[in-house]
Image (cartoon, rainbow, N blue to C red):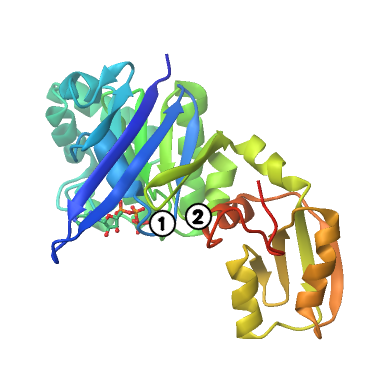
Amino acid sequence: MPLLEVQGLAKRYKAKDGTTVHAVKTVSFTLDSGQILAFLGPNGAGKTTSIKMIAGLVRPDDGDALIAGQSVRRRGRAALTHLGAVLEGSRNLYWRMTPLENCEYWGGIRGMKRKSSRQRGLELLDLCGLADKAHHTVQQLSRGMQQQVAICCALLHRPALLLLDEPTLGLDLEASDRIQALVRDLALHDQVGIVLTTHQMEVAQTLSHRVAIIRKGEVILENGTEQALAAFSGNTYGVDLTEAPSTDLRDRLEQRGATFDSPVSFRVVLESASDVYPLLDSLRPIGVLRVQRETADLATVFRHYVELDEPSKSLTGGGAE
Ligand code: ATP
């Protein structure tokens, strides 16, 4: 039995003008213990709404999420005992309280006794190297430290499943690395299953075992991260130019799924090696310094699925799948 089974979740909202917004049309995926799933999608694709339905904060119109076999819809309380969550924009911490007081408070919400919340809180803060900050108020801590404390608070009751919404957003490299190490550690050593929502493709690629991409409320790719990358690796080309293309040409390339690493170099997925010729034609009169097959990265895979007007169109207009 998977740790998390998301089955056809759907949610509609009434907008202010009376029209219906299909925030989530149909979202399904599964996750096992010890795995990290990167849940990716562009702004407004329906990630937060899906995560809130899994966390029991938004009632779905259709579908359900089963956590350790328990239905969030029908057995909310029982299912949610297995869940910890740090959601972007939510009140995950009280800023005027210390990390330890936050642990006591959030442990209490989870039905834990004060003493065991403190003990477990100290253990987790120590694991994050924050034991010496246990008695400072949260507002005195850096953003990275606050994020770590929020994750500690979500882990007090030893949940089997952790939902993390943008855990490394706005953090400097060192703080981001620390959070990533913690997330990796939780999956590897404690067998926690983690759903990670992020716009940072490098973080997603480094951490995830599986990837689910959502576009306009529907999951359009669910696969092992390595398999998703391998499927594109033979077809991904890196191109270096002698000068930056015009805004118009760059826009056209990006609409066809090209990812620019710098003003003069990009990666793109082609259907076959012979599609290199029409690509080069489209670049005229700009000089081409290098065209080379490359290993795909998650940003390229993501763009290919999400940013093409129609997923079945490639740069040269052929079928992509
Ligand atoms: P982002 O990456 O920008 O956070 P997201 O993928 O998390 O986006 P959601 O926040 O789930 O997307 O929103 C999906 C769609 O549903 C959007 O069009 C959004 O405007 C709409 N939506 C979300 N919540 C509500 C609400 N309470 N009332 C009306 N529309 C909503």
Res 200 label: 2
Dot 1 crowding, Cα within 10 Å, few <14, some 14–19, many 20+: some
Residue at (26%, 57%) from the top-left corner?
140
**Quarter containing the N terminus:** top left
Q: Would the CB of label 1 be found within 8 Å of ligand 1?
A: no
Residue 86 appears in view: no
Residue at (31%, 46%) from the top-left corner?
24
Residue 315 appears in view: yes
Q: Is residue 143 above or below residue 84?
A: below
Res 169 label: 1
Secondary structure, mark 2, is loop
* 292 horizontally vs 121: left or right: right
Q: Is residue 156 above or below residue 272?
A: above
In this view, the residue in front, 240 or 98, is: 240
Q: Amino acid at mark 2?
A: Gln
Dot 2 crowding, Cα within 10 Å, few <14, some 14–19, many 20+: some
Look at the numbered discs 2 and 1 and tell me whether their residues touch, using CB distance below 8 Å: yes
Percent coordinates x, y for residue 193 in the rendering? 43, 27
Q: Quarter of the image holding residue 28?
A: top left
Residue at (20%, 21%) from the top-left corner?
116
Q: Amino acid at mark 1?
A: Leu
